[in-house]
Amino acid sequence: MTDDRDESLEERREHLGAELASKRAEMKDDERAEVRAEVSRKGYAQAMKLSSEFIAAIIVGAVLGYVFDRFVGTAPWGMIILLLLGFCAGVLNVLRSAGKVATPMLEKHGLDKK
């Protein structure tokens, strides 16, 4: 009788061990999927940040050019020049945010007054 009981307990322990191993494998798969989703979300957030910085610089350049043209009366030239400057500023901001261009020396040495 004790042998039957020991065998039954041994079978149950092996069965529970197998179930536990399968649950651990499922949890690892879920963790990997969550890590991939988090990386994807971070990439999407970075893309939105870069695109909004680029578009904002262009819009600010265009608006300033329009206002400059209205007050000075230099018809299309103020808008063309400031729109191009806004485009260049947008490209520079994107490159800085992406880490492709170094920040100015004042920020690097802590000399800027914040």
Image: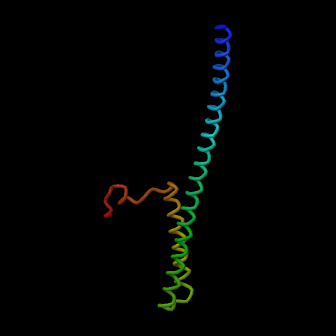
- For this rendering, which residue is in front, 23 or 8? 8
Residue appearing at x 33%, y 62% in the figure: 112
Residue 22 lies, in percent from the top left, at 66, 30
Residue 61 lies, in percent from the top left, at 52, 76
Residue appearing at x 60%, y 56% in the figure: 44
Up-down relation of residue 106 to residue 82 (above or below): above
- For this rendering, which residue is in front, 94 or 6? 6
- For this rendering, which residue is in front, 94 or 30? 30
- For this rendering, which residue is in front, 21 or 82? 21
Q: How is the image coloured?
A: rainbow
Residue appearing at x 64%, y 24% in the figure: 16
Instruction: Give the number of callouts.
Output: 0
- Quadrant (top left/top right/bottom left/bottom right) for the N terminus: top right
Looking at the image, residue 17 sits to the left or right of residue 92; the answer is right
Residue 7 lies, in percent from the top left, at 67, 12
Up-down relation of residue 56 to residue 69 (above or below): above
Up-down relation of residue 111 to residue 68 (above or below): above
- Quadrant (top left/top right/bottom left/bottom right) for the C terminus: bottom left
Up-down relation of residue 21 to residue 36 (above or below): above
Residue appearing at x 47%, y 90% in the figure: 72
Q: Quadrant of residue 32?
A: top right
Residue 5 lies, in percent from the top left, at 65, 12
